Image (cartoon, rainbow, N blue to C red):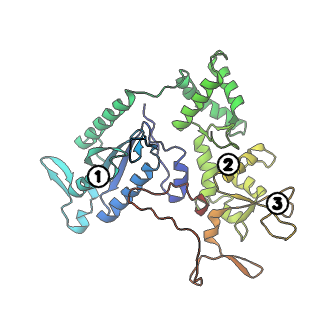
């Protein structure tokens, strides 16, 4: 079976893509918008090729000079909006009908360049598919379907080993999510979830060993049915059963508050980009007494989307530690996404300034990518979001 994922396109959400992106057993369709000018069109597509490369697992043996992809994902490059190609604006004959087939010369050249640069990391199809997505029955669309089937067959020929109960669990998850929401809960701990699987599937407890259960969780996380931060010690015992709820209702509101009007972080934060735990409860519509809120704050802190602000009582500064981690009797948190939108001023001193023209000297560390096929993953500098 295929699982189709439609990722949020706003740059603020790129950080969340790593939760679902995997190069293993994957086929990526990279689209170039033919209605856009050539330079911009291929620059945008090149960005996503670099983005995909960040998910490819690399390894190097003793007899190899360079790192190689452990398993190459398949990449198919397509041109969309054939019916609105920019030749209408520029007069260029870029998309042409040749022997009854649509062709884009610049697209073919782009595929060759991609193969030259990314060939060590991707299995790249030779064709540039010129599509008019309003014509689902055209010959090009059928050729694309056949290409997808061929790659899918290749991937399926060496399937991942997963527990036999996977199919039953996947079919059961919608019901588990529904029951979870009715209880105003958004996650299970591992022990609790294991008991639910045993009860709902009517499986012998001796067959669902801890080893089998962990293998099951890893696969469900791999295909995006659940979210499990296995290697985060603060969250490794928690299974988020509803990824859509987590990304839309929680992470989305912290990453891109401008898209949410009700109880927005923008509305509730003070001039320093700081909000309280009580504010978070309003934003996420969660009771402050619920243990959900503490776990959610732990999740956001683990993703570097918020930071608890603590008070140094000795120097009266907001940076040290105190016994309760409270300021004025409240737990307070700094939201980095707000810093770029407010000039923070306290006691006459500017704490943050968007306009850097007044500053003559800077120091720090600069990172530069020395080739055109690499980039930092979206989550590499989450504090800069």
Going 53% across and 20% down the picture, which residue do you hit? 164
Discs 2, 1 touching: Cβ within 8 Å: no
Q: What residue did someone put label 1 on?
A: 116
Q: Residues within 10 Å of mark 1 (few under 14, many from 20)?
A: few
Going 39% across and 56% down the picture, which residue do you hit? 373
Q: What residue did someone put label 2 on?
A: 299
Query: Quadrant of the image for the C terminus?
Result: bottom right
- Please identify the residue farthest to the left as the structure is shown: 99
- Indicate the position of residue 210 as horizontal and vertical percent values: 65, 25
In the image, is residue 215 above or below residue 314? above
Query: Quadrant of the image for the N terminus?
Result: top left
Q: What residue did someone put label 3 on?
A: 321
In the image, is residue 146 above or below residue 83? above
Q: How many marks?
A: 3
Q: Residues within 10 Å of mark 2 (few under 14, many from 20)?
A: some
Question: Is residue 37 in view from this perspective?
Answer: no
Mark nearer the N terminus (1 vs 3): 1
Q: Quadrant of residue 358?
A: bottom right
Going 69% across and 67% down the picture, which residue do you hit? 273
**SS at mark 2 in the image:** helix
- Indicate the position of residue 100 as horizontal and vertical percent values: 14, 46
**SS at mark 3 in the image:** loop
Q: CA distance from mark 3 to mark 2?
A: 21 Å
Left or right: where does residue 56 sit relative to residue 355? left
Left or right: where does residue 27 sit relative to residue 182? left
Mark nearer the N terminus (3 vs 2): 2
Going 67% across and 39% down the picture, which residue do you hit? 236
- Indicate the position of residue 204 as horizontal and vertical percent values: 65, 15
Instruction: Say which of marks 3 and 2 sits in front.
Output: 3
């Amino acid at each position: 079976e295929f699982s189709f994922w439609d990722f949020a396109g706003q740059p603020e959400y790129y950080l969340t893509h790593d939760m679902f992106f995997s190069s293993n057993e994957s086929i990526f369709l990279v689209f170039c918008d033919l209605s856009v000018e050539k330079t911009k069109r291929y620059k945008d597509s090149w960005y996503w090729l670099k983005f995909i490369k960040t998910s490819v697992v690399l390894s190097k043996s003793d007899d190899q000079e360079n790192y190689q992809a452990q398993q190459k994902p398949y990449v198919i490059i397509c041109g969309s909006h054939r019916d609105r190609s920019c030749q209408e604006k520029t007069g260029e004959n870029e998309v042409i009908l040749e022997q009854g087939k649509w062709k884009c010369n610049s697209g073919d050249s782009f595929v060759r360049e991609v193969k030259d640069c990314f060939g060590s990391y991707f299995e790249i199809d030779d064709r540039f598919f010129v599509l008019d997505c309003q014509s689902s029955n055209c010959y090009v669309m059928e050729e694309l379907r056949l290409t997808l089937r061929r790659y899918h067959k290749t991937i399926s020929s060496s399937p991942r080993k997963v527990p036999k109960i996977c199919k039953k669990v996947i079919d059961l998850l919608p019901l588990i999510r529904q029951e979870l929401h009715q209880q105003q809960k958004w996650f299970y701990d591992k022990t609790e979830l294991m008991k639910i699987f045993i009860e709902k599937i009517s499986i012998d407890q001796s067959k669902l060993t801890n080893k089998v259960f962990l293998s099951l969780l890893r696969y469900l996380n791999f295909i995006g049915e659940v979210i499990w931060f296995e290697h985060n010690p603060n969250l490794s015992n928690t299974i988020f059963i509803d990824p859509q709820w987590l990304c839309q209702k929680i992470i989305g509101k912290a990453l891109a508050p401008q898209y949410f009007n009700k109880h927005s972080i923008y509305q509730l934060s003070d001039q320093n980009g700081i909000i309280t735990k009580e504010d978070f409860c309003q934003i996420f519509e969660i009771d402050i007494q619920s243990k959900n809120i503490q776990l959610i704050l732990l999740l956001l802190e683990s993703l570097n989307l918020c930071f608890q602000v603590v008070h140094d009582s000795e120097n009266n500064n907001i940076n040290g530690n105190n016994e309760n981690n409270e300021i004025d009797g409240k737990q307070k948190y700094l939201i980095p996404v707000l810093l770029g939108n407010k000039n923070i001023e306290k006691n006459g001193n500017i704490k943050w300034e968007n306009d850097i023209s007044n500053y003559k000297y800077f120091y720090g560390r600069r990172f530069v990518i020395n080739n055109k096929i690499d980039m930092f993953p979206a989550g590499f500098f989450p504090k800069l979001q």
